[in-house]
Amino acid sequence: MVDRVTQAPAGRLTQAPAGPARLADIAGQADVSEATVSRVLNGKTGVAAATRQKVLAALDVLGYERPVRLRQRSAGLIGLVIPELTNPIFPAFAQVIEQVLAGHGYTPVLCTQTPGGATEDELVDQLVERGVTGIVFMSGLHADTTADPARYVRLAGRGVPFVLINGFNDAISAPFVSPDDAAATRIAVGHLRNLGHRTIGLAVGPGRFVPVRRKLAGFLDAVGLGPEQAAAQGLVQHTLFSVEGGQAAAGALLAAGCTGIVCGSDMMALGAIRAARQRGLRVPEDVSVVGYDDSDLFAFTDPPLTTLRQPVRAMASAAVDSLLEEVGGNMAHHNEFVFQPELVVRGSTAPPPLPAAV
């Protein structure tokens, strides 16, 4: 039996000196038997594709180079266009999309937009020039109601399949994958109402974006009709999707007497917590804050953040599956696949403070 794994000049597995991974290490990481690892590494048949992928992933996670015989020839390049990497939800999506694409043999090409850098249109041109098989757009211009959707019509005319995540536009004929943003704010308001909060504000991004409009609609629907909804209109702050934006919005909402704040992203929620503390308020004893996204970081903030979790893996898998259907010549449904968010209750929400005694 092979005890240690390394790559010989011809791609053969040989005995190695100290350093390379042991079969037991790989088996433990992949949660399979050492015999299965041995079969995969020696190119033997009789191993399910999913199991083989787990073993290769274990090699990668442990930081060991794959033997030459296990290196797949790329089935093609897939472009992934995302706004930026500073918001942890975008790297979270990118990582899962890349994993799913790799499982199908495709090589992802990650493109991010930075202030003053290449625009989405310029990035698309570069990807098309490189001969990409398809493109995944994440929170792109398709989500901006002021942007011209004709750019996506032109892209389809160039024969490049694409899928769009987060932001539906009925003028674009392509598969869309979105979280249910309206349901998210309804759930958040319901959670705060159940805790006893009555003055609840909403901090969201610019109103021209589809997800923002949906979050606003869900918020207004949750607070009720008539006078209550009219009053709630004054407790909505549109700002930037950033810590600083959340801080500015929360400052205005706290001044208006809000004891609960629903935020359009986790980054904004961090800003809301900062704004509360600058005013000598405690979270959650004086003010409750709810975020949106739930990337891994936010379980470890102070306090741990109550948030609405986007089903990242399910959404990413659906997006890739839809795109590869198009790549394979099978027209995917040109409509919107909507995924339900999940409320994750942590330490940033609690009942409101009791009224001061007279």
Image (cartoon, rainbow, N blue to C red):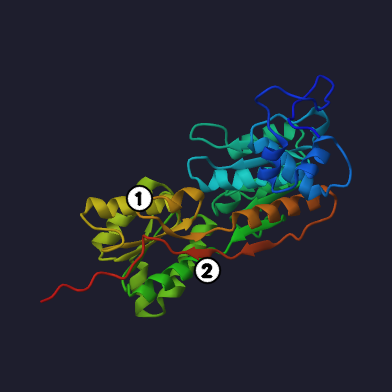
Counting from the top left corner in percent of width and height, residue 98 is at 67, 42
Q: Quadrant of residue 4?
A: top right
Can residue 158 be seen here? The reply is no
Three-letter code, disc 1: Gly
Q: Is residue 53 left or right of residue 90?
A: right
Quarter of the picture containing the C terminus is bottom left
| Residue at 46%, 48% in the rendered image | 297
Q: Earlier in the sequence, mark 1 or mark 2?
A: 2
Q: Is residue 158 left or right of residue 227?
A: right
| Residue at 35%, 46% in the rendered image | 244
User: Relative to the observer, which residue lies in front, 95 or 112?
Assistant: 95
User: Relative to the observer, which residue lies in front, 350 or 81?
Assistant: 350
Q: Which secondary structure, mark 2?
A: helix
| Residue at 22%, 73% in the rendered image | 354
The residue that disc 2 covers is: 183
- The mark found on residue 164 in the picture is none
The residue that disc 1 covers is: 271
